[in-house]
Amino acid sequence: MTDWTERAAPDSAEIEAMAREVIAGLPVEFAGHAQDIILKVDELADDEVLDELEIDDAMDLTGLYDGIPLTAKAPSEPQHFPDTIWLFRRAILDEWAERGNVTLGELVRHVVVHELAHHFGWSDEDVARIDRWWE
């Protein structure tokens, strides 16, 4: 049995490192565009984001893509802010604890791939090829 008395929950830097591993492992056709996305980890989504998304409980939002999907970008309409993927540490840890049947790395991978799917406009087949969770 694991002794949890000396362990602490992963901090934001550890969650970010897991997410960066996912991005680094993407297939070559996606890797270049994914490198341009800003990755941020926060404890929870703020009230403004929750209100905009009509979400009542911050623990229900594990990640968020903030940007314009590649399929909707036009050279004649430049974007004035960087594409960003937000991961919400406490919501991720809460979902991980509730599930009890996946590793934290698997859950972080799932959240990152889901948010990348918003950026790329991926088909279900594309997502399933990268993240078996989607099959």
Image (tube, rainbow, N blue to C red):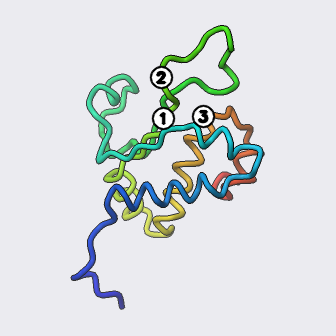
In the rendered structure, the answer to whether residue 6 lies left or right of residue 65 reads left
| Image spot of residue 54 (x, y percent) | 37, 26
SS assignment at label 3 = helix
User: Of label 1 and label 3, which has the lower sequence position?
Assistant: 1
> Closer to the observer: label 2 or label 3?
2
Question: How far apart, in angstroms, are the residues tagged by discs 1 and 3?
Answer: 11 Å
Q: Count numbered badges in the picture.
A: 3
Kind of residue sitting beneath label 2: Phe
| Image spot of residue 122 (x, y percent) | 71, 37
The residue under label 3 is 118
Which residue corresponds to the image point at 50% horizontal and 34% vertical from the top-left? 65
| Image spot of residue 32 (x, y percent) | 68, 42
- Residue 84 is tagged as 1
Quadrant where the image shows the N terminus: bottom left
Residue 36, image quadrant? top right
Kind of residue sitting beneath label 1: Thr
The residue under label 2 is 81
**Vertical side of 119 occupied by 95: above or below:** below
